[in-house]
Image (tube, helix red, strand yellow):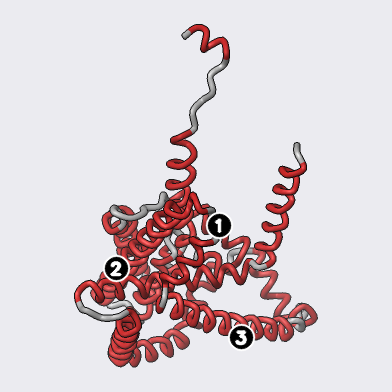
Amino acid sequence: MTSRSLLGILALVVLGLLLWELRWVMLALFGAVVLAVALDVPITMLRRRLPLNRPLALALVLAALVGIGGWLGSLLLPDLLEQIQQFGQLLPMVGQRLAPLAGQLPGLRQLEDQLVAGNLWDRLQPLGSQLIGVAGGAANSTVQLLLMGLLALLFALDPRSHLRLLIAATPRFYRPRMQTLLQACREALGGWLAGMTLSAVVVFLTTWAGLVLLHLPLALLSSLVCGLLTFVPTVGPTAATLLPLALGLLVSPATLVQVLILRLLIQNAEAFVLTPLLLSRTVNLLPTVALISQLCLGALLGLPGLLLALPLVVVLQVISEEVLVHDVMDHWDRPQSPKSKTLI
């Protein structure tokens, strides 16, 4: 191994360690890129139909989002707040329904005895410091979200300057290819966001209609949770089903079964029919790839990594297809041995 190769490997190791130390900054930066692409999709559609410059188109898109959000808030927010209050009142009833089942488990019964006897008081005292830590983490996350939103607005306001800066950082011979690669990543990410948004809206509306027909309490709250968690495939819909199932248990066991059947039908239709149809022209991730990416990034980076796992995998899949497959594997000719040359 030459000294140049050794220095190159050492530089890659140092770069990897630096990126790991700055992983939260890189995650916030990627989140800002995802938000900027989400804003760029309606901006591009608007500029194709109207002779507008980019700042004016961005202002119109933001005004439309604020207007639609205010209209939906005035339409749904009163019922949603009322249902949240009802959920707080119904939560003890769910515990009462589950108490006979939990009493059959010896571990939970022993835990209840210890709580009644007061033996766990010493263990519960550090809870205050943990709550303070959670509050500090929430404040830090709020600041990161605000900075992420500001970065997204700056990216969406002038994406060409940032693209030129990124292209200029690549070798000269690869700059045209880098421009094509960035455009492919933007199209794939924008198509994925548009498809998942439409899928989430369809899941929300169909779940809401089904739960209303079943006369389930808090149908709007449950449907909203199911729609939002559609952006976290494989894990999100399964976790979202727990809320309507708990509410169905309050009504009757028959309602619980009906809610389960409804969620299974909607979840499978969304996973195997609607989402592949919407993403057929962009990037359709395999369920195994999506689940593995969520597990890995969730374990490494927590909840932010879990939420941004799929957009990151969409970008990495495009880069792998364009760089690893087309630029490397397709041009990798197997060297012929001297013996094979003489035989030919």
Return the mark for residue 213: none
* Amino acid marked by disc 3: Ala
Q: Give how far apart the Cα atoms at labels 2 and 1 are.
A: 25 Å
Pointer 2 or 3: first along the chain: 3
What residue is shown with label 1?
A: 295
Q: CB under 8 Å between callouts 2 and 1? A: no
Horizontally, residue 7 falls left or right of residue 58, namely right
Residue 172, position as x, y percentages in the image: 51, 53
Crowd around label 1: few <14 · some 14–19 · many ≥20 (10 Å): some
**In this view of the protein, which residue sits in the foreground, 76 or 187?**
187
Of the two numbered discs 2 and 1 in the rendering, the one whose residue sits closer to the viewer: 2
Q: Which residue is situated farthest in the right direction here? A: 122
Q: Give how far apart the Cα atoms at labels 2 and 3 are.
A: 31 Å
Residue 83, position as x, y percentages in the image: 38, 87
Residue 217 can be seen, yes or no: no
* Amino acid marked by disc 2: Leu
Pointer 2 or 1: first along the chain: 2
* Amino acid marked by disc 1: Leu
Quarter-of-image position of residue 120: bottom right
Which residue is located at x 62 percent, y 82 percent? 140
What residue is shown with label 3?
A: 139
Quarter-of-image position of residue 219: bottom left
Which residue is located at x 38 percent, y 72 percent? 38
Residue 16, position as x, y percentages in the image: 67, 57
What residue is shown with label 2?
A: 198
Crowd around label 3: few <14 · some 14–19 · many ≥20 (10 Å): few
Pointer 3 or 1: first along the chain: 3
Q: Which residue is situated farthest in the top direction here? A: 343
**In this view of the protein, which residue sits in the foreground, 160 or 65?**
160
Horizontally, residue 138 falls left or right of residue 277, namely right
Q: Secondary structure at mark 2?
A: helix
Q: Give how far apart the Cα atoms at labels 3 and 1 are.
A: 26 Å
